[in-house]
Image: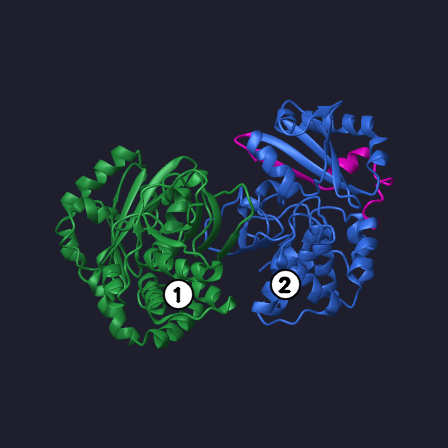
Chain colours: A green, B blue
Amino acid sequence: MEKILVIGHKNPDTDSICSSLAMANLQTKLRGEEVISCRLGEINEETKYALNYFKVEAPKLIEKVDEGQEVILVDHNEFTQSVEGIEKTKILAVVDHHRINNFQTSEPLFYYAQPVGCTATVLFELYKSNNVEIEQQIAGLMLSAIISDTLLLKSPTTTDKDKKAVEELAKIANVDISKYGLEMLKAGTNLDKYTEEELINLDAKTMEKENIKYVIAQVNTVSIPDVLKRKEKIEHEINKVIEAKGLSLFVFVITDIVNSNSTAIVLGERTDAISKTYEIRDNLAEMPGVVSRKKQVLPLVEKNI
Amino acid sequence: MEKILVIGHKNPDTDSICSSLAMANLQTKLRGEEVISCRLGEINEETKYALNYFKVEAPKLIEKVDEGQEVILVDHNEFTQSVEGIEKTKILAVVDHHRINNFQTSEPLFYYAQPVGCTATVLFELYKSNNVEIEQQIAGLMLSAIISDTLLLKSPTTTDKDKKAVEELAKIANVDISKYGLEMLKAGTNLDKYTEEELINLDAKTMEKENIKYVIAQVNTVSIPDVLKRKEKIEHEINKVIEAKGLSLFVFVITDIVNSNSTAIVLGERTDAISKTYEIRDNLAEMPGVVSRKKQVLPLVEKNI
């Protein structure tokens, strides 16, 4: 029998990597057999900082899974964001904090989702309810995931449960939340090393609504103007993706993590899904106070597209 | 603001009614505002026995919900099994023990499902994790739901969690499980009072796979031959439904709850989905050892249709 795989979403962010590692740790303990943490893409700079800090190896890189493979999904449920071959797997469990869409199983499963800021917050409750002690390294990873997803508890997605989890996890991990958190987030804003093609794929989610396909990508920075210096080249890459994947819309959200604002590059036939709310000039939409793709950008596009 | 509604599936069985009442009770306590238990159809004889025994009023009968209504689903997630208008509601939470299919939301939600015998078993854990005491009447209802769904813990869907919940709930409800359970199940086997049209709708679930629509209905009895005395009239009603709803298959499972066997009346273009496994003679398939639609009949049809 193949070992059970824990899988986060494509273009993995810190939550997808750290929750995969934490869930594999919890499941290995609960099942008494090794459960393997996997990832579907390269580790970004922010996540690398967290893994180095807590001295944890990255999950195993996989590209596809075989028919009948037993899998556990974390931080996503939509098949379009999951591993190649997901339709033919046996999904044992999902732990998530997103809407449910493009997802189905033929058998009952364990599914635990909460409308909180981060998957690791739901995992934190799972550790508790199963009475499994959280090791220091794992606590550090879960803490990193919550800091990342909530931008240090500042995003509108942040809930009291996230705050409570962060407080307790920081104690176990033995770190100063603000100091560690800002260092980690800043590590993720070094975008110079990425090509424009890499940049628009770093944290890109493909969505589908009634056969209309669109992508919302996001990068964090400490200087939006710095990123916009590369605007022309970024647009060129986005247009290539739009054509190759038949997208109706590509929204590239550039988020200033210090001042909690975003500017988006908006391209495609259906830019009206954004322009109904935010004026678009020269393909740019300024979005004051916007930091959350899930809570602020996605519902808008979903409603208007 | 309209009050939040807790909704079980169409053609409500004992789990759908009792879990709706229990979840409304729990949510009312957690939210500090009245949450309304609803039902989408008539109460069957078995459920009536449980409600009378524990002196609880039936949930409110509703037919549809308005756009934007806040709802909580129990014991189902598939929109085809839910209330009219479900697509336009705001689904706050789901507590269930079925596969996930034909279900989607545009926003994150609370979703708690486990592959156990009964929704009430998952609810039992929710009461525990929220540190809410279970009242005697509610314990009686949850106990009834588990007895009903697991046929007194004999169905292959039964898990250790169901057994543990039953044990604890029986203490709170202060009943003898075997005695009460058999009385309740027997109350549900009095099928004489139903017309054939009612009989095939008592506990019928409509499924859809790649635009192929089919129904699997089930009734419990202490004598399969007694039910088959009405075979011709039942077949007549089934054929009417097949035509009216454009079904490819209708499986009417008659389950002997004492001997744990079933015989099914199988009609429609796609009877091959059953006959690949069980010989069909004169529209009848004998299914020795089969008592669970979810675990034994549905996966078979899903695979072969």
Label 2: which residue? B124
As drawn, the label of residue B123 is none
The residue that label 1 is drawn on is A158
Q: Amino acid at mark 1?
A: Thr
Q: Nearer the viewer, mark 2 or mark 1?
A: 2
Q: Horizontally, is B173 left or right of B80 in the view?
A: right
On the image, the x and y values in percent for residue B42 come to 76, 46
Q: Disc 2 and disc 1: Cα gap in Å?
A: 28 Å
Element under label 2? helix
Q: Which residues are magenta?
A: B187-211
* Image quadrant where residue B133 sits: bottom right
Residue B3's quadrant in the figure?
Answer: bottom right
Label 2 CA crowd tier, 10 Å (few <14, some 14–19, many 20+): many
Residue at (60, 40) in percent of width and height:
B80
Could you say which quadrant of the image residue A305 lies in?
top left
Amino acid at pointer 2: Phe
Answer left or right for A292 relative to B165.
Answer: left
Specify the subunit that label 1 lies on: A
Residue B273 image position (x, y, % from top left): 61, 28
Determine whether A11 is above or below A18 in the image: above
Judged from the image, the secondary structure of the residue bearing numbered disc 1 is loop
Q: Say yes or no: labels 2 and 1 on the same chain.
A: no
**Residue A210 lies in the magenta stretch:** no
